[in-house]
Each structure stands twice: as C-alpha cells, then as structure tokens.
C-alpha cells in the first residue's frame, strides 16, 4: 500500500538537517511551513534511539507493527523525516492507558446502505486510508464485498449483483463521492456516509475503470 | 494492660481507623495481637503477592472489607506485559470457601474475570461494595452477575477499567427488589445502556448519592434521572449534548436548580459548551470538579465555568486550560487543595500545554494546595523554588515534563535545585515524581530532606549509582521506589539489601542492573521475590550473568515465589 499524501522516505543524507528549505515535509492542504517549524521545536530527541517507538502520522501505518527495537539505521533515516513523524518513548508521558485511549479522537459517523432498514455507525479515526474504509464496509455489511479493480471504490452485493458506490455528506451539506480528496480532509469534513446504488449514482460514479491519480 | 477484659481493649481499638495504627497495636504483645486480629474488619494489602489468601483468612476471621492491589504502578504506562499476573480469582475462591462474611472488595490493577465476579456475587450474602480501579479481564456479563445476585448491593464503582462491553442488559439485571444502591459509577463503560432500566433503577434507589454515567446516556435521560434523584452529592454526566434552545434543555435547567446537594461534578465526555450554563447554579457549591475527560470544553467557555466555582477543593483538568486559565483558577479557587493537570494531547507536542507560569500562579492563589499532578511543557528552577516557598504543605508532588529530560529553558541547567527546594520546604512530602533534566544532585537533596517520603518515581535521571544510593540511605520511610531509564546498576542495588524488606517494592527498568546483580540479591534475601521480566528472545537461550536486565520488579513477601508467574517472568 502506497503511503498517503505522497510522503517518501528521503535518501539517507547525514547533512539533510541543514537543508531545511529543500526538506520534504508532510503538509496538509493549507498548512504552511511555519506550522511545521512549530512542531519541529520539541522534535528531535537525542539518545533515545533504542527506546523510541517511532509512530508516524496515522496516514502511513507501515511501521505500526514493528518491534520496539527499530534498528539504528532505520532510526537515523527516519530521524530525517519531516517533523510530523512524532517520536514516542514507550510509557511517556506517564498517562494511564485508559485515559490515553479516551483522549484519542473519535469520529463516529452514521453509515446508511440503500435498501437496508437500519443504519450503522463507524469511527473514521480508526482508519488511515480509503482502502481501509472499504474493508470496514466489507466487514460491517456481510453481504457486500469490495470490487475495486482499478481504484473505483465500489462494493457489490454478492447475492444479487447490485453495485454500491460510497458517498458522503460534507460539512456544507452536499453529497459527494468518496475518494476525491486526501484522506484526512475527508475525515475532517465527512458528516455521514451512504452506500448508494450505482444505478442511482449516474453521473457520479465512475463508469468504467479509470486511470486514477488519487492514492488508495 | 492485663487488667482490662478483652472487650474493653477491643472497644479501644475500634477508635483506631488507620491500618497502620492497628498494625502497630498488634505488635505490642500477644494479648493485643489476639484481640486485634479477632476484631479486625478492614484489611489493606498493597501487594497481593506479599501474602496468601489462606494466611489472611486464618489471621482475620472477622474480615469484612478487603483492599487488594496487584500489578506494579508502571503497568499503568504499558511497561508491564499482559498476562503478568495480579489475578483476583484465588482470593475470591479462598474467601468463598471460608466462613468470611465479605462485604466490601476494593481492587486496583488486578485481573478480574467474569468467573470471579460470578463467584463473588454468589458467595457472600451480605456483599455491599465493589470498587474496581484500573482493572481488566471482565465483561458486562460479570457486572450482570453482580447486579443480579448481590441483594444488598450499595456501591458499584468502576474507575478507568478496561471492560469488554457486551452492551445494555446488565443494568436490567438489578432486580426490582434492589433498592439499596448508594453509589453507581459506570462512566468507563464504552457501550450502550438500557436507558429505561437506568431510570427505573434510579427511581427505586432513594439512597443514591453518587451516580456517574457513561457516554451512552444522553442529556434527556440525565434530566429525568435528576428529577428522581435530587439528593445526589456526586454526579458524573454522560453525553452532555443538546440544542440549548430545546425544551429538554430548559427542563434540565429547572431540574438542576433542585439539586442543591451536588458537591462533586465530573463527566462531560461529550459536551456542547452552549449547554454549560445549566450547571452554573450548582457550581458555587462544588468542592470537586473533574473535567479531565471533557476535551470538548476549552478556551473561554472553560474559564467562564471555572469562575463560578469558588469553593473548589479538588480540580482535575486538561492542559488546554493553559497558563492563562490556571491564573483564573488561582484567583477564583482559593480553597484549592488538589490539582491535576493532564495532557490533552498525550501523543503530541502539546501546543496548548501549560508551563511554569501557570504553576507559580496557582501557588500564589492557592496556599492550601497539598496534592499536585502537573504535566507541563517546561519547568524552571526559579518557578519550583517559588512554589516551594508559597506552598510548604505538599504531601504529593508529581511533575511531568512532556519531554522527560528537558532542562530549565531559561538557564539550561538541570532541575536539581528546583526539586531540592520542594523537598526542603515540604516537610510532610510523602509522594514525589520527578522529571526534566536531573543529575545525582537532586537525589542528594532528596536523601537529605525528604524524611517522610514514601513513594518516589524516577525516569531518565541521575548520572551514577550515587544517585540511587542517596535515596536508599536517606529516605527512611521509603516504601515504593520505581525507576526507569536511569544509570543505576548493581552497586546501588546491592548496597543495602536489608532496605528492601522495609519497603513494599522496587521497580527498575532500562537501568544498568545485570542478571548477576539480581541473582545475587535474590540469593541473599530469601524473603524477597526478585522477578525479571523478559520480553525478548535474547535472554531465553543463554542468559549471561553480565547481561543487563530490562525489567526487574522485587517485593517483600511471606509466601515465596508466586506460582502463577507466566513464562516471561523469572523468579530468581
């Protein structure tokens, strides 16, 4: 799975720290470099490479299942990462696990499926990509499976062959097709989800498999 | 002493409420020991592995109230792997088999299963109080058993437990005949609640004085409940969200005016700040306010709320209150005794975090302050010295800089002198947690001045064994010492082995202690359990004595190595 938002691991370059201007940064739309600088202030910690559990911005869960002991080279490479990669020391700050989990942000939204009498709810903060969201739909609605051959983001009811396209209502009250904007932007603006029958989504849903530049 | 019949001695002992006093009394002579043990009803066991349930039952046949603690404190911060231990099942089994008429059970950091709860609920006809703090291993099915079978249940208090929520029906398991509830706290449950059952339960509980709801209880239900329970003293709201122009909200405003007894307020797990004015009328009477889970209240709304709470003695808050907000607390809450400021962003950089400025303001405005837990962006020696001077009454002082080795940002010095001032000024200090850049010097101060210190938590501090030695030698009343990521090794560990029998426990992780050091200590001190926690494969195959030990936990015990230790825990 390719990382979100076009983040790349930079070439290993020990002088990278001096080249701030050309440094790749993880930036959300609208964020300025100044914002990144503020985050950088308490960023680099020296001497904790054995115990750091580098936990990236959730948009890439590439390292989520790593052992706690990352090897040193990996640490140094990642230390050149944009400051948005937050370094965590295990067990610090000393806050009870229950409280830490409670302070995690939730974003529960209602999910409606055309034709189904009951709605469901899911927490968008649990997922870091559209692909994961589709998997969540797949799990939540047992009759639906993903058919996402070329980034179309569709689901199909295997029993009757009906195709569904995920749509969402945004903050302005408009109904939008899921998948156009970066994941985080979507989470921020999504108020509710609706799996709409493809047949009704004429004009909205992709007709044929398209080459899509958007990330999954 | 021989002239008094036992009953008189017993009556005198009745006046001794603290465990320590009763323990002391039992040491005077065998007659007093005997009288004391037959009349003892409440027992506190700080480490469930220090003694066996059978020995407890033998000594105190009149036991009615038991408090047990399981896992080491650092388990709260994910430093102890799951399945480490701390099971309550053997205790409940042993008590159930005996003739003990258990009425109260309070557990902290223990593993509690549904089976345990079921057994508990069926074994003690007069069971009244269950308090579970930071426990895990059970589901709402276990709660259902408690609700259904404990006919005279008064308190069910669940604080910050990891409970598998199978939703809804457990509340309905309280029979209609159950009318004895005085305290119900299920704020930590994550699932749905049968609201109708809850309302009926409250309606038939005339003695209910403490009620803390979970997120699933909406504002409409809160209003109906308050109508039924106007004598509540302690309230934890669930979801506090509604349209402030609605009829429901107006009803709530009127209902709250009748709740003149509320002194403790908490909750607001979900909150619509525009609905806060409904609670302003009761704020003046509040002595305790816990907004540490109320991430939805900040900025000017938070400050407006605080300004109404002039009589607060205890305040738990998030650091998004900022230094400015703390200044408002300082000017409003002059009776404040306990303050806890939690990080609102425990994973992040904390733009909103508080600094030394807020703490100094508090120390000026709140001279009665004696308990502090303060997560902050930074701290200075000057500030700590000022705080020490303004508040000499600290009993608990726990400071946590979000960057654990941050020096004084003004001078770039370690925070040794600041903490030194605290221990020197606060002669009654019993609990201390340090953070920031710290050298051996801070431990020298602690050893010299912290005469009443019982619990010390240290992380990323010190330069050499001397640091730990200062503490072990100087703090005569030390009971619990927990250390992580410090350069303390075998020399410090082995310098005064007898000391550990005067303490409850010692935790050392990511220090310089080696397997040899731990083995040596274990050999010399048979009445200590010296446990090593191995999470990595390296140790399993060919553990060399010279190898550093990742995690060591030692504690005094009367019953030898525990039999329920998992594979990754070695008792040396």
Image: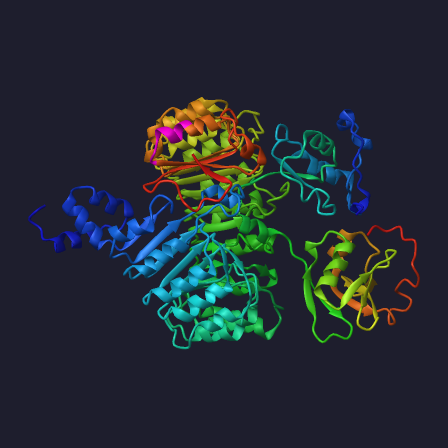
From the viewer's perspective, is B42 left or right of B339? left
Choose top left, top right, bottom left or bottom right for residue B454: top left
Residue B469: x %, y % from top left: 40, 25
Residue at image coords 54%, 24%: B413
At x 37%, y 45%, the residue is B46
Main secondary structure of the magenta stretch? helix
Q: Quadrant of the C terminus of chain B?
A: top left
Residue B381 belongs to the span the image colors magenta: no
Q: Where does the image place residue A26, in percent across and percent down from the top left?
A: 77, 41
Instruction: Write down the region rendered in magenta.
Output: B520-527
Q: Look at the image and say whether residue B521 sits in the magenta stretch.
A: yes
Picture quarter with the N terminus of chain B: top left
Identity of the residue furthest to the front in this view:
B541
**For residue B479, above or below residue B234:** above
The reply to whether residue A158 is in sight is yes
Residue B432 horizontal/vertical position (percent):
43, 37
Q: Nearer the viewer, residue B30 or B318?
A: B30
Q: Point out residue A5 in the picture as x, y percentages from the top left corner.
A: 80, 46
Q: Is residue B270 above or below residue B359?
A: below
């Amino acid at each position: 799975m390719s990382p979100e938002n076009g983040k790349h691991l930079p070439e290993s370059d020990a002088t990278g720290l001096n080249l701030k201007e050309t440094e790749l940064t993880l930036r959300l739309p609208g964020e300025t470099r100044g914002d990144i600088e503020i985050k950088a202030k308490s960023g680099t910690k020296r001497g904790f490479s054995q115990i750091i559990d580098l936990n990236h911005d959730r948009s890439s869960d590439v390292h989520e299942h790593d052992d706690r002991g990352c090897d040193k080279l990996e640490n140094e490479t990642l230390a050149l990462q944009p400051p948005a990669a937050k370094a965590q020391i295990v067990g610090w700050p000393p806050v009870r696990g229950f409280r830490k989990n409670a302070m995690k942000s939730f974003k529960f939204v209602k999910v409606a499926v055309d034709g189904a009498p009951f709605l469901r709810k899911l927490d968008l903060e649990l997922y870091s990509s559209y692909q994961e969201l589709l998997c969540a739909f797949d799990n939540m609605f047992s009759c639906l499976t993903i058919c996402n051959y070329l980034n179309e983001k569709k689901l199909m009811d295997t029993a009757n062959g009906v195709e569904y396209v995920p749509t969402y209502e945004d903050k302005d009250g408009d109904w939008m097709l899921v998948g156009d904007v970066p994941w985080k932007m979507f989470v921020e603006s999504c108020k509710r989800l609706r799996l709409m029958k493809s047949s009704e989504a004429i004009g909205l849903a992709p007709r044929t498999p398209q080459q899509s530049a958007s990330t999954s | 002493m021989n002239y008094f019949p036992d009953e008189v001695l017993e009556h005198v002992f009745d006046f001794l409420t603290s465990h320590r006093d009763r323990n002391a009394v039992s040491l005077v002579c065998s007659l007093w020991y005997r009288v004391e043990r037959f009349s003892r009803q409440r027992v506190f066991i700080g480490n469930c592995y220090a003694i066996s349930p059978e020995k407890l039952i033998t000594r105190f046949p009149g036991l009615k109230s038991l408090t047990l603690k399981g896992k080491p404190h650092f388990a709260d911060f994910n430093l102890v792997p799951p399945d480490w231990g701390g099971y309550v099942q053997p205790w409940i089994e042993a008590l159930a088999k005996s003739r003990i008429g258990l009425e109260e059970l309070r557990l902290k950091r223990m593993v509690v299963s549904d089976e345990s709860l079921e057994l508990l609920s069926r074994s003690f006809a007069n069971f009244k109080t269950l308090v579970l703090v930071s426990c895990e291993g059970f589901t709402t099915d276990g709660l259902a058993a408690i609700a259904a079978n404990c006919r005279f249940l008064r308190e069910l208090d669940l604080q910050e437990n990891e409970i598998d929520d199978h939703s809804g029906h457990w509340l309905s398991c309280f029979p209609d005949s159950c009318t004895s509830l005085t305290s119900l706290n299920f704020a930590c449950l994550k699932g749905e609640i049968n609201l109708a059952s809850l309302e009926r339960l409250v309606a038939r509980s005339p003695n209910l004085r403490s009620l803390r709801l979970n997120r699933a209880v909406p504002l409409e239900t809160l209003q109906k409940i308050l109508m039924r329970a106007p004598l509540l003293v302690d309230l934890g709201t669930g979801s506090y969200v509604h349209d402030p122009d609605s009829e429901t909200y107006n009803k709530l405003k009127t209902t709250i005016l009748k709740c003149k007894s509320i002194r403790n307020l908490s909750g607001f797990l979900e909150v619509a700040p525009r609905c806060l004015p409904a609670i302003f009328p009761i704020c003046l009477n509040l002595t305790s306010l816990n907004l540490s889970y109320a991430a939805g209240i900040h900025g000017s709304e938070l400050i407006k709320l605080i300004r109404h709470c002039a009589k607060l003695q205890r305040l738990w808050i998030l650091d998004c209150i900022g230094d400015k907000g703390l200044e408002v607390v300082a000017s409003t809450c002059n009776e404040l005794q306990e303050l806890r400021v939690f990080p609102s962003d425990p994973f992040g950089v904390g733009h909103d975090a508080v600094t030394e400025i807020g703490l100094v303001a508090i120390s000026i405005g709140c001279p009665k302050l004696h308990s502090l837990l303060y997560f902050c962006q930074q701290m200075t020696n000057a500030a700590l010295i000022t705080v020490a001077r303004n508040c000499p009454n600290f009993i608990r002082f726990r400071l946590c800089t979000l960057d654990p080795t941050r020096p004084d940002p003004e001078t770039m010095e370690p925070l040794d002198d600041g903490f030194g001032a605290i221990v020197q000024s606060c002669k009654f200090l019993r609990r201390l947690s340090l953070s920031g850049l710290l050298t051996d010097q801070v431990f020298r101060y602690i050893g010299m001045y912290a005469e009443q210190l019982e619990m010390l938590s240290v992380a990323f501090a010190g330069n050499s064994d001397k640091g730990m030695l200062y503490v072990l030698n100087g703090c005569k009343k030390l009971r619990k010492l927990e250390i992580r990521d410090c350069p303390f090794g075998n020399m410090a560990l082995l310098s005064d082995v007898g000391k550990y029998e005067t303490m409850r426990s010692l935790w050392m992780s990511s220090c310089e202690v080696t397997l040899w050091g731990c083995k040596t200590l274990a050999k010399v001190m048979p009445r200590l359990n010296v446990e090593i926690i191995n999470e990595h494969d390296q140790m399993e195959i060919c553990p060399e004595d010279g190898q550093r030990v990742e995690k060591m936990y030692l504690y005094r015990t009367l019953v030898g190595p525990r039999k329920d230790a998992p594979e990754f825990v070695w008792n040396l």
